[in-house]
Amino acid sequence: MTTTLKETIVKRVPTLGLGGAALAAAVAIAGCGGGSSGSGSGSASATPASATTGPAGVKVVTRHTKLGNVLVDGRGRTLYLFEKDKGTASTCYGACASVWPPLTTGAKAKAPGLHGARLGTTRRKDGKTEVTVAGHPLYTYAGDQRAGDVKGQGLDQFGAEWYVLGANGHKIEDGS
């Protein structure tokens, strides 16, 4: 069964009710074309090369995509940084977090890994603990339908651009 972007957004925002979920879906759909000519959908084609797992089971691995080796979560979903974030403080809440769900954990992530990238956590204003790499809060993108998709690369949404991260924790600007 294929899940559409609208269905994904509605599932991610159950507390908003029907009107709020419809609004979130409209924002997501309108934002999908927002401000960037580039997006792509490379599929993951390699076994994870490296992994670090936090105590709550959060896993960050590297996977080869059309943009090269990028960070993905344990399900193979590409991880992004948001240029609007300053330091480890997330600025993505509400409708933004519906389209760009933060990678959260129930406990602190452990150990560096991933080719020198520092795995850590930060406390969000909503009380959740978000995973960081090299000081960047991590997000997935609701528009990525399959493991290894990189459709969020270079999009300009919610006030800034979004980029995938390489195995070293630095943003990859190519392919946007």
Image (cartoon, helix red, strand yellow):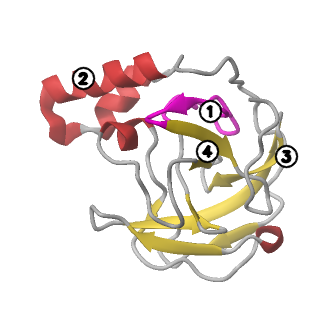
Which label sits in the foreground, 4 or 3? 4
Which mark, by number, is residue 77?
A: 4
Name the residue tied to disc 2.
Answer: 23
User: At 50% across and 73% down in the image, what residue appears?
Assistant: 121
Looking at the image, tell me whether mark 3 or mark 2 is earlier in sequence order. Answer: 2
Looking at the image, tell me whether mark 1 or mark 3 is earlier in sequence order. Answer: 3
User: Disc 3 and disc 2: Cα gap in Å?
Assistant: 37 Å
From this view, report whether residue 99 is shown above or below residue 105.
Answer: above
Secondary structure of the magenta portion, mostly? loop
Looking at the image, tell me whether mark 2 or mark 1 is earlier in sequence order. Answer: 2
User: At 54% across and 66% down in the image, what residue appears?
Assistant: 87
Q: Residue 41 appears in which quarter of the rendering?
A: top right
Mark 1 belongs to which amino acid? Arg
User: Disc 1 and disc 4: Cα gap in Å?
Assistant: 7 Å
Q: Position of residue 62 (x, y in %)?
A: 76, 56
Q: Residue 61 appears in which quarter of the rendering?
A: bottom right
- What element does badge 1 sit on? loop
Q: Which residues are magenta?
A: 142-159
Which mark, by number, is residue 146?
A: 1
Query: Which residue is at the front of the view, 138 or 84?
Result: 84
Mark 4 belongs to which amino acid? Arg
